[in-house]
């Protein structure tokens, strides 16, 4: 009431202010019940019916006439409970109050939010018309709120109820233990109230990508009450509760962890991608919660050829299965498992041909299932035998090659260093090596057997060339002399060489050069007319002959120093025989030829009185012996020399002629060439009698007894060797090297070697006969002797030696002194013997005729002449060109 009075006083004050103080003594306040309050006088103010304003607290609204009744009407929104009265004011500031008609109120409560009541009260204010106030209707819409929203609080969740008081709360894994039992018993509301949870007895499962999800459901119910400022309301609330736990199963396959897929019934399945190894015998499956378990696998495997020799493919699958035990929703249950692991991998290691250097050569599988490869070229020897018959594989094993019996000739077009193309013939031998290999896989126990075949070729450049190079003349002393055969033509078969008669005692051999594929016989030497030598050889079906003729001694001018005659007793008796053929006192040189089994002739020079005859120098070789006599006219002192050469036809051979070196030895090829066109050798030298290989840097060298020429080609090269006899014990080896790139022309390296043997390297006499008698106590190592002779001016000396060694002997005789030079068969050693003659106590006429002494070779010759003939068959196989003779070694 006090509040009402305050408002009324304020209205009066306002009215007074509006009238500017006029009639202040008579101002009155009109009351809502029609009475007036006289503050200063009893006059009654009048409130205008227009421009009225209703005021409630701080809210106001203009009154407008109701369209139906014309009564001024207004509606005001107000926060709070309805006021007891409102104030109506006109435009002049006159006002009156209107009381709350509580009987006309309309109240509505809105309770959609649990815990909150929103109340709306429509309050009516009506004043009847009086003499000083108009009739008015005012509606005040009063809004009130009571309480605070109530939510379900769980963890970080604040879950609101819907308008019906319902909500749902989802819980995590912590709400379900490992036995699938709920661990949360009640829910707490935001107002502190508790709601007990009733959990359902069953559970459900779902199948998300990360594994089985086990879900438990339940509910909680209760009431929420709000009572505030006279406003009260109670809500019935209910909460649906669910709790979920992911039960993911994993396992490790081939080192990688995988998650199993859960079916709707809770069983787990997984089909893995194919792995490249044999699967494990068991798998361990592990759940998110609970115990792990082992699954035993059942594996099926198949083996197949992998398409590479030495490898196979193993494929199949392993299955790991286990039946369900109980239900996955029960405490002790295990789900069922069905896991499949396919696999495929390669077992074994590829098998290749493994050359000495470089990468292996791969096999290629044919349509018939056999693997085939072509091995690198193998060097074909001059005897058409491959240098090896084994092929090494990459696993260290070796295969034996079965070669064809006969080589063939093939033609290839190659490009030379000058860029020009040419066709080269090759001798080629083909072969094959076959085998099987079994590939085994320990893990699966499977195996595959594969067949393979290797094609092999051995080749070399074909060489059927043949050239007569020269005739080698080997004198008793001095170096061999090469007499070239000029303008050799393979179509021409007969050749003539004419030499001086002085050369008739020398040894002759034929030097030729031929390719490894040429068919060449050994040279044959025979005696022709007048001691001529006929050297013949057959090559590639043609017989070539070289005839060496000796010029007859020319007649010299007449001289008082001349013989009456030279007589030859072909039976060897020391009596005068028949006059020598072609005799003329002024012809000084003669030749006598005898058969191999004929006795040594006795040769006697005879002169007139006043003419002295002395036996002089002697030259001896395996072919012939030449005796010199010095004839002197006592009156004038004029002298000149007569010579008789005895040449014996024979078939035996000296050690030089008999010697044939062993086939060259190819060393294992190991060094890598600088490129595929490289034609240089790694080394050359010889293999000694103990099999040791000794490389040599020189191109001309000696090979010790028992040794043989050897060479070492580089990996991938094909090398062949041809050999030619130069002279005596000296041979030339030509190594033809075909590079790895067979389109490149081959190259040749030439080496000249002298073979050393005990016989052919010896230069020693076995005795010395003086006047037909051997020197007593002769020792080959004693090189000087003094002998007694009947006449130091007329004595003969006849060296004795083993002609089978190939030695040659020359005797230089000057009065009482004789010098004997012995040269070894290989031409590298010389030994000099000296003999000095002294007068016997009883002088005699001395000896000038020669003949009758046996040489140690067993061939009958004259004691002084020793006309023992050496084998005329030469076995020389090569050319003389480029031969370098060493300085001879002198035996001491």
Image (tube, grey):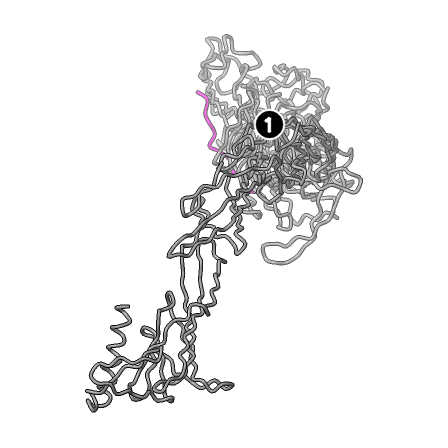
Which residue is pictured at 71% across the width and 24% down the height?
651
Instruction: State the SS at label 1.
Output: strand
Q: Nearer the viewer, residue 728 or 304?
A: 304
Instruction: Tell me the magenta residue range.
Output: 880-892
Q: Quadrant for residue 652, please give it.
A: top right
Q: Nearer the viewer, residue 536 or 869?
A: 536
* Residue 677, percent from left and from top: 57, 48
Q: Which residue is mark 1?
A: 626
Q: Is residue 821 left or right of residue 537?
A: left
Asked whether the viewer can see residue 226, the reply is: yes
Q: Nearer the viewer, residue 636 or 889?
A: 889
Quadrant showing the N terminus: bottom left
Q: Quadrant for residue 715, please give it.
A: top right
Residue 491 vertical position relative to residue 451 in the rendered view, above or below: below
Quadrant showing the C terminus: top left
Residue 787 vertical position relative to residue 135 in the rendered view, above or below: above
């Amino acid at each position: 009431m006090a509040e009402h009075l305050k408002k009324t006083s304020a209205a009066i004050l306002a009215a007074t202010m509006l009238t500017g103080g006029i009639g202040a003594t008579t101002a009155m306040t009109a009351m809502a019940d029609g009475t007036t309050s006289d503050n200063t006088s009893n006059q009654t103010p009048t409130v205008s019916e227009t421009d009225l304003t209703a005021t409630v607290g701080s809210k106001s609204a203009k009154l407008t006439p109701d369209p139906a009744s014309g009564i001024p009407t207004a509606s005001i929104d107000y926060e709070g409970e309805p006021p007891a009265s409102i104030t109506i004011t006109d435009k002049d500031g006159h006002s009156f109050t209107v009381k709350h008609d509580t009987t006309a109120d309309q109240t509505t409560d809105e309770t959609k939010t649990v815990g909150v009541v929103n109340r709306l009260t429509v309050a009516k204010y009506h004043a009847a018309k009086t003499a000083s106030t108009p009739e008015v209707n005012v509606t005040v819409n009063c809004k009130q709120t009571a309480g605070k929203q109530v939510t379900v609080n769980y963890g970080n969740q604040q879950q609101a109820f819907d308008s019906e008081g319902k909500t749902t709360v989802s819980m995590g894994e912590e709400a379900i233990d490992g036995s699938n039992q709920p661990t949360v018993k009640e829910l707490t509301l935001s107002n502190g109230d508790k709601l007990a949870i009733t959990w359902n007895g069953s559970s459900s499962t779902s199948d998300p990508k990360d594994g089985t999800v086990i879900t438990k459901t339940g509910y909680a119910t209760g009431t929420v009450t709000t009572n505030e400022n006279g406003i009260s309301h109670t809500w019935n609330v209910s909460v649906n509760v669910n709790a979920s736990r992911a039960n993911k199963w994993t396992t490790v396959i081939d080192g990688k962890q995988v998650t199993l897929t859960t079916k709707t019934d809770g069983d787990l399945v997984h089909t893995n991608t194919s792995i490249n190894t044999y699967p494990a015998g068991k798998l361990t499956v592990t759940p998110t919660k609970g115990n792990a378990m082992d699954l035993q696998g059942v594996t099926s495997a198949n083996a197949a050829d992998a398409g590479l020799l030495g490898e196979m493919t193993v494929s199949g699958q392993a299955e790991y299965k286990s039946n369900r035990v109980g239900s996955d929703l029960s405490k002790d249950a295990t789900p069922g498992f069905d896991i499949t692991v396919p696999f495929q991998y390669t077992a074994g290691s590829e098998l290749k041909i493994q050359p000495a250097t470089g990468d292996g050569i791969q096999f290629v599988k044919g349509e018939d299932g056999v693997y085939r490869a072509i091995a690198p070229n193998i060097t074909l020897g001059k005897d058409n035998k491959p240098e090896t018959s084994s092929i090494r594989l990459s696993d260290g094993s070796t295969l034996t090659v079965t070669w064809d019996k006969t080589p063939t000739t093939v033609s290839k077009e190659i490009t030379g260093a000058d860029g020009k193309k040419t066709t080269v013939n090759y001798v080629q031998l083909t072969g094959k090596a076959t085998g099987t290999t079994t590939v085994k896989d320990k893990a699966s126990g499977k195996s595959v057997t594969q067949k393979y075949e290797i094609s092999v070729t051995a080749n070399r450049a074909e060489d059927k060339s043949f050239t007569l190079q020269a005739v080698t003349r080997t004198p008793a002393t001095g170096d061999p002399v090469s007499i070239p055969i000029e303008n050799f033509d393979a179509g021409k078969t007969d050749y003539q060489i004419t030499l001086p008669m002085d050369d008739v005692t020398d040894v002759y051999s034929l030097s030729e050069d031929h390719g490894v594929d040429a068919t060449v016989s050994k040279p044959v030497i025979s005696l022709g007319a007048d001691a001529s030598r006929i050297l013949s050889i057959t090559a590639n079906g043609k017989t070539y002959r070289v005839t060496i003729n000796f010029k007859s001694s020319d007649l010299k001018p007449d001289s008082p120093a001349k013989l009456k005659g030279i007589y030859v007793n072909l039976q060897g008796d020391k009596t005068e025989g028949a006059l020598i053929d072609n005799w003329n006192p002024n012809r000084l040189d003669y030749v006598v030829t005898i058969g191999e089994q004929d006795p040594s002739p006795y040769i006697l020079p005879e002169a007139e009185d006043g003419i002295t005859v002395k036996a002089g120098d002697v030259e001896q070789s395996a072919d012939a012996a030449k005796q010199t006599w010095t004839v002197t006219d006592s009156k004038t002192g004029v002298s000149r020399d007569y010579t008789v050469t005895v040449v014996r036809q024979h078939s035996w051979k000296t050690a030089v002629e008999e010697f044939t070196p062993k086939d060259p030895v190819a060393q294992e090829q190991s060094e890598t060439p600088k490129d595929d066109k490289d034609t240089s050798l790694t080394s050359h030298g010889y293999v000694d009698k103990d099999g040791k290989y000794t490389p040599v840097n020189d191109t001309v060298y000696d090979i010790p007894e028992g040794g043989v020429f050897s060479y070492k080609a580089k990996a991938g090269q094909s090398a062949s060797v041809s050999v030619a006899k130069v002279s005596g014990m000296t041979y030339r080896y030509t190594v033809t090297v075909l590079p790895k790139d067979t389109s490149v022309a081959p190259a040749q390296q030439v080496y000249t070697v002298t073979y050393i043997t005990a016989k052919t390297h010896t230069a020693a006499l076995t005795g010395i006969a003086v006047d037909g008698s051997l020197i007593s106590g002769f020792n080959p190592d004693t090189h000087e002797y003094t002998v007694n002779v009947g006449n130091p001016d007329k004595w003969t000396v006849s060296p004795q030696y083993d002609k089978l060694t190939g030695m040659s002997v020359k005797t230089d005789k000057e009065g009482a002194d004789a010098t004997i030079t012995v040269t070894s068969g290989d031409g590298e050693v010389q030994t000099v013997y000296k003999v000095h003659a002294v007068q016997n106590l009883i002088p005699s006429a001395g000896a000038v005729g020669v003949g009758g002494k046996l040489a140690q070779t067993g061939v009958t010759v004259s004691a002084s002449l020793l006309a023992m003939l050496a084998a005329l068959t030469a076995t020389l196989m090569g050319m003389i060109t480029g031969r370098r003779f060493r300085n001879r070694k002198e035996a001491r």
